[in-house]
Amino acid sequence: MNALSPNPPPSDQKGLELTALYEVSKILSSSLDLEADLLAVLRILDNFLGMKKGTVTLVDPETQDLVIEAALGLKEEDRRRIRYRVGEGITGKVLKTGLPMLIPDVGSEPLFLDKTHRRPDRMEHNIAFLAVPIRRGRETLGVMSIDRSPREGALSQEEDLRFLTLVANLIGQMVALHRRVAQEREALLEEQSRLKEQLQQTYKLENIVGQSKVMLSIFETVHRVAPSRATVLLRGESGTGKEMIARAIHYNSPRADSAFIALNCAALPETLLESELFGYEKGAFTGAAGEKKGRFELAHKGTLFLDEIGDMPIPFQTKLLRVLQEKRFERLGGTKTHDVDVRMIAATNRNLEDAVARGEFRADLYFRLNVVTIYLPPLRERREDIPLLAQHILRKLNREYGRSCRLTPGALEVLMRCLWPGNIREMENCLERVYVMVKDDALAGQDFHCETCATHLHAALLFSQSSAGSVPVGAPQPLRTGPPSRVGHAAPVTLHPDEGKERTRILDALERCGWVQAKAARLLGLTVRQLGYRIRKYGIEVRKL
């Protein structure tokens, strides 16, 4: 049977309508491409039921006019040009009343405007024009219209009108869903833009605390290196703010609108490190149910920050070097080569020169990373910044806890005398601990006289007596190319009596906790980092049970 026959038997007509309705429902539930889906619906009505010159007009939320969203046989420039005001012509009248209209003979209807000029022979008789509202609940979202060839009896045209109304209701649901998704997407884009602007403001160099001579020199270096494509190597002890400087470089660079992706190389074994950096294809290994983009792909056109790069396994260093040199890679389990444009920033608290001499770090990777080196000094070498940092941390705590605490001169004096082996991160923890425990709004010096601060005060005294002419921990050293030196036994540690007591307490806690440092730290009221510092300081040999 010919689906385009103008007068199919009633039973065949019903079958065609059901088939067309099924195809329409499949189209409208398959995607969110509004224009393409509406054109597909109009083609289905044309092919299955002979409904010609289909047009879908939707209300413009700003002007409240009807604009053509999809039309068969209409050029793009004409579609965008044509508009209908409320009440204008048949289409505008359907929008105004919210009721369907049936024009049995479009050639003799004065209200028919034919703005699309798709009917050159207006005198052609018995061509019906059907227009139905596209509704969602009580709201009229637009109008759908078609031309209909002559059929037997007016009842057939009424059936067409009911069928079109059903299709228009399906379109109304799809249009409402599309608009809701568009609104949510716009809100997400606005939120993304706001957060990106907030990040750029947060990581402006003016917002990084520090007025010491060494920090001003670092700020100047960051200003110079940020606009370039040069690889940056950040060096310094843990807790000195390497990631913050890395973000400052990114958000002050031409890549600020692209992604900043960070990865801690010491936190993952080699196999996971490869999949995290390069991604993997479906089926690359057990559990790889789908493909996954790696950090390099996610950082394309942006910045990739690799923290603790000195702890990266030797076998993987070769793979990283290849990507840095060729700027291309393959996903794990894949053969397709992906080109990538990434600005690399690396950070480490290790002495890479010694690591190269011992064969623990590749010399070629070292030279590839060591383009621009920025050394971040420990807090004990920039003591003039301690009051500024303390006030900055306190303001942040006041915002978080809704209080208005302040530091007394006595508290600042205690903070200035501390050694801060954990640097800024340890200062943040110390201030928050005191902030939470005190009841008054003034943080006094005696509030900081805890075991940790007392140890720091004594260590600071020892440090001040022995630091003359010493080289800061983590500072770059000349690269030695000779054979690795043999590591001898550590020299015996001479301890103060109070330190001897503390060493005994730490050993006792480690024994009781089965040498699990996290449990021992909780038992001693310390952080894991603080406990690790004391273990190294007192020369305690950690047992592995």
Image: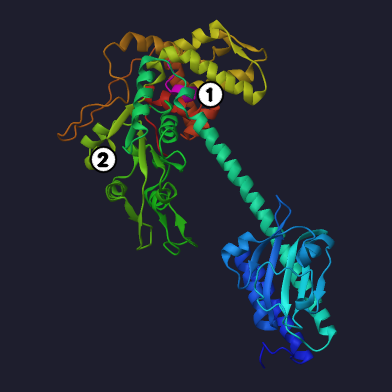
Q: Which of marks 1 and 2 is nearer the N terminus?
A: 2
Relative height, residue 199 to residue 503 (above, below): below
Does the magenta-highlighted stretch encompass residue 529?
no
C-alpha span from label 1 to label 2? 36 Å
Label 1, on which residue? 429
Residue at left offset 65%, top offset 50%: 184
Residue 238 image offset from top left, x and y in percent: 41, 28
State if disc 2 and disc 1 touch (CB < 8 Å): no
Name the side, left or right, on which 402 lies relative to 230: right
Can you say whether 21 is above or below 232 in the image? Answer: below
Q: Where is residue 442 in the image (x, y as percent from the top left)?
A: 63, 10
Q: In which quarter of the image is residue 88?
A: bottom right
Residue depth check, mark 1 versus mark 2: number of the one nearer the observer: 2
Residue carrying label 2:
368
Q: What element carries label 2?
A: helix
How packed mark 1 is, by other alpha carbons closer than 10 Å (few <14, some 14-19, many 20 or more), is some
Give x and y (percent) for residue 326.
28, 51
Which contiguous range is marked in magenta? Answer: 419-426
The answer to whether 15 appears left or right of 327 in the picture is right
Measuring from the top left, give residue 149's x and y in whole percent.
73, 84
Q: Which residue is drawn at 62% across and 50% down?
A: 185
Most extreme residue toward the top is 409
Please tell me which residue lies in front, 375 or 452.
375
In the picture, which quadrant includes the N terminus?
A: bottom right
| Residue 30 visible in the picture | no
Q: Which amino acid does label 1 sit on?
A: Asn
Say how many tags the image has: 2
Determine the secondary structure under disc 1.
Answer: helix
Q: How crowded is mark 2: few (under 14 residues within 10 Å), some or many (20 or more)?
A: some
The amino acid type of the residue labelled 2 equals Arg
Q: Quick check: 349 above or below 80?
A: above
